[in-house]
Image: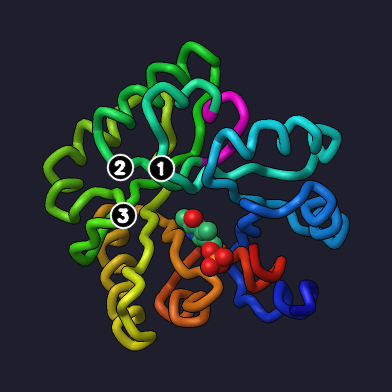
């Protein structure tokens, strides 16, 4: 995968989160030196030492994309710029409270499941609607969009339909961003209006 040509092939308005979980700091440095700004990590234990040893990369922004446990919120708020994976109002409230204590206001997304998928966390669309007014009123988070992950068993055409639902739902809520599409299905996500794609193995090779 030639990184620069991949980056240049993305339409305007689509940003790449390079998912660096399972990858070494030297691989991250290599992409950063080629102009990549946004990196995603999903496991805090793995991420913290990496972020620490990459502190000198001042232009890099860190995205937390994994499932977030309550007792890890403070560390995530302190170390990450964007959180893609809020899956409950309770978690959102906690992030907002702790962000206030840390004098932060992170950009966040609500993770939504548009299909039943027991292996994934997330709000159902109805579940998010129920708590929506309380969610967006929280003072110390900046809710910018929705994040979704396709269930493994869907083919590319079914994924396109799912991504379209995410785009439509985000517009209904007045949100600009959709974080959707990974190595296998980023093209379909871009076609359906992704603003962030989260790509790992396609860029870095296997984990
Ligand atoms: C690992 C991961 C990705 C990237 O997956 P690839 O298939 O390697 O592109 C994207 N999003 C989330 C939430 C992940 O955990």
Q: Earlier in the sequence, mark 1 or mark 3?
A: 1
**Which mark is in front, 1 or 2?**
1
Residue 85 visible at all:
yes
- Look at the numbered discs 1 and 2 and tell me whether their residues touch, using CB distance below 8 Å: yes
Q: Quadrant of residue 49?
A: top right
Disc 3 within 8 angstroms of ligand 1 (CB): no
Q: Circle 1 — which element?
A: loop
* First along the sequence among labels 3 and 2: 2
Q: Are marks 3 and 2 in contact (CB under 8 Å)?
A: no
> Would you say the beta carbon of the disc 2 residue lies within 8 angstroms of ligand 1?
no
SS for dot 3: loop
Name the N-terminal-most of marks 1 and 2.
Answer: 1
Question: Residue 11 lies in magenta, yes or no?
Answer: no
* Residue positioned 80% across, 59% down in the render: 31
* Position of residue 116 measured from the top left corner of the image (x, y, whole percent): 18, 63
Q: Compared to 107, does 95 lie above or below?
A: above
Question: Disc 1 marks which residue?
Answer: 67
Q: Which mark is residue 87?
A: 2
In the rendered image, which residue does mark 3 sit on?
Answer: 120
Q: Residues within 10 Å of mark 2 (few under 14, many from 20)?
A: many
Give how far apart the Cα atoms at labels 3 and 2 are: 10 Å
Q: Residues within 10 Å of mark 3 (few under 14, many from 20)?
A: some
The verdict on residue 81 being magenta is yes
């Amino acid at each position: 995968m030639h990184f620069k040509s991949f980056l240049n092939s993305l339409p305007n308005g689509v940003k790449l989160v390079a998912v660096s979980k399972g990858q070494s700091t030297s691989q991250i440095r290599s992409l950063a030196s080629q102009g990549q700004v946004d990196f995603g990590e999903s496991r805090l234990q793995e991420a913290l030492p990496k972020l620490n040893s990459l502190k000198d990369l001042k232009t890099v922004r860190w995205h937390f994309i994994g499932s977030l446990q309550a007792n890890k919120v403070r560390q995530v708020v302190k170390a990450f710029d964007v959180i893609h994976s809020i899956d409950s109002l309770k978690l959102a409230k906690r992030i907002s409270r702790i962000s206030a204590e840390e004098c932060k206001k992170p950009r966040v997304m609500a993770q939504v499941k548009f299909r039943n998928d027991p292996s994934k966390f997330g709000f159902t669309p109805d579940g998010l609607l129920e708590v929506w007014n309380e969610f967006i009123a929280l003072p110390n988070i900046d809710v910018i969009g929705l994040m979704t992950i396709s269930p493994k068993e869907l083919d590319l055409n079914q994924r396109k339909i799912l991504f379209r639902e995410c785009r439509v739902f985000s517009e209904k809520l007045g949100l600009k961003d959709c974080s959707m599409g990974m190595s296998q299905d980023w093209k379909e996500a871009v076609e359906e209006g992704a603003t962030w794609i989260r790509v790992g193995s396609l860029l870095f090779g296997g984990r």
